[in-house]
Amino acid sequence: MKRILIILFFISCWTFGQEVNVNLSSPYHTVFTHLHFLQKESYDPAKASRSIYGHRGEEGEEIAIKIFKVLNGKGLYVDLNTIPTDKNYKDTIDGQVVSKYTLFPYRFPELAVEKRNGFWYYSDNIVDQIDDIYLSIYPKYSEQLEKFIPDWGYKKIVGLELWQLLGVVIVLLLCFALFNLLHTIIFFILKKLQYLITHKVSTQITDSLKKLARPIVLVALASLVKAVIPILQFEVDVNEFLFLSIGISITIFWIFVFLKLVNVVVSVYAYYAQKTDSKLDDQLVPIIRDFLHIIVVLIGILRMIMLFGVDPTAVLTGASIGGLAVALAAQDTVKNLIGTVMIFLDKPFHIGDFIEAGQVVGTVEKVGFRSTIVRASNTSIYQIPNSALSEMVVNNFGLRSYRLYRTELGIRYDTPPELIEKFVEGIREIVKNHPDTRKDAYNIEFTGFGDSALLIFVNIYLPAREWGKELAAKHSINMLILQLSYKLKVDFAFPSQTLMIEQFPNRNELKES
């Protein structure tokens, strides 16, 4: 047993002492060679530069170091376990099969390795652009920063150097100081733009602009912090966490920016919609706002998923399949949504119109995403699915030029003919002189003999207005007719019967008694 342990000990020591050689036989080995020889414990830029094709000496070392620092500055942690070890690895790019592997296809697509003369090197694309990419992350003044850091600044506390902690404090204080200033400036600019568009000052729009300015400032400040992080030279794992956190924060802030922007746009639309006679476009305001809010949130979620390196094509494909499954499971909801669109396109009625749809008669109060609310005359609420309502025969009383008022007056049988004529003429004069009647189309005639009354037919037209005003006009006309009847002493009949007993048996005996 002791011999086995001794042998294992010497094998492990021999393996540990083996020198890592330059190996460019596969994508994995090339990336490993580059990263390994730029670590503190195995720092050898000359060997790391072997991963750069056609560049040797100081030029190659500088390119290799810059690629390494860019990865660190972007917070991109290379997971070697995901890189292929096949020396004949091929990938399909733009429809062509090539010997090329991209490390971060969506977050850093420029960084790739490709096969040349049987070995793998970093592609010319990243080599040609590395200077510009490096300067975009590390400005020139950042390289001079180390000259001003005293020796005590490199002491570590909680895993970070003192100068890095001081830099974090300065950045946070700068953000707090800039917040109110930027908010005032951006709000002022937005108000000027709003005035140029509407030429009016609206309290509702102003409130929406004030809420819009806040997330815009947060996006600007988060972008500032993101630009400063590489200068602080944190370790790659710290940068990875910080960049992911800031990326999520910026995405959330942008979601709020677009949500508030939707509110501003909808507020402007509502401002103009209030000036139109139609009330249906007023009802369209909340529907547009809710729909755009959903779109903004979905796009924001998609963007947030991409921050974790997920393929957006796969996300969209999954979302499409999931959306199809949801649509099949919620066919009624989709039908109602289509019905809503058809109602707003066809405009069979407006908010406040008095309609008849099937067995429902009432005033339209609200047109929503899923259903329309109609209030009946007895104040009952009917909620009709828009899919059904779009297929119904809708009688819109509100779209009529005039509304028909038809009634029948019954007067007593003992009313003289000349008095009937005066009564009919009097009603005609009422119609001619009343402000709420159509003067060129009406019918007031003595039309027949009822069971218990002489019948006078009244057929007049009232201007199409709200139902309450129509009832008021009917009330006024009825009162004038009633006053006329009292003036002429024309009595209205009520149901009655006369019993005739001329042929009653033993009639004479009844008279004698």
Image (tube, grey):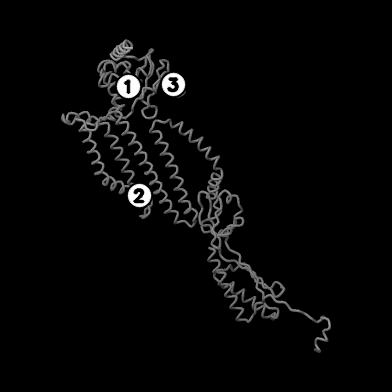
Task: Judge by depth and name the residue closer to the eye, 124 or 108.
Answer: 108
Q: Residue at x 50, y 36 (%)?
A: 322
The Cα atoms of the two marked residues, 1 and 3, are separated by: 20 Å
Q: What is the x, y in percent for residue 116?
A: 38, 15
Taking the image as shown, residue 13 lies to the left or right of residue 322, namely left
Nearer to us of marks 3 and 2 is 3
What secondary structure is marked by label 1?
A: helix
- Residue 91 numbered mark, or none: 3
Nearer-N-terminus badge (1/2): 1
Q: What is the x, y in percent for residue 486?
A: 60, 80
Q: Which residue is mark 1?
A: 127
Whether the residues at callouts 3 and 2 have beta carbons within 8 Å, the answer is no
The Cα atoms of the two marked residues, 3 and 2, are separated by: 49 Å
- Residue 463 appears in which quarter of the rendering? bottom right
Q: What is the x, y in percent for residue 102?
A: 39, 23
Q: Which residue is mark 2?
A: 209
- Within-10-Å neighbours for mark 2: few <14, some 14–19, many 20+: many
Q: What is the x, y in percent for residue 487?
A: 60, 81
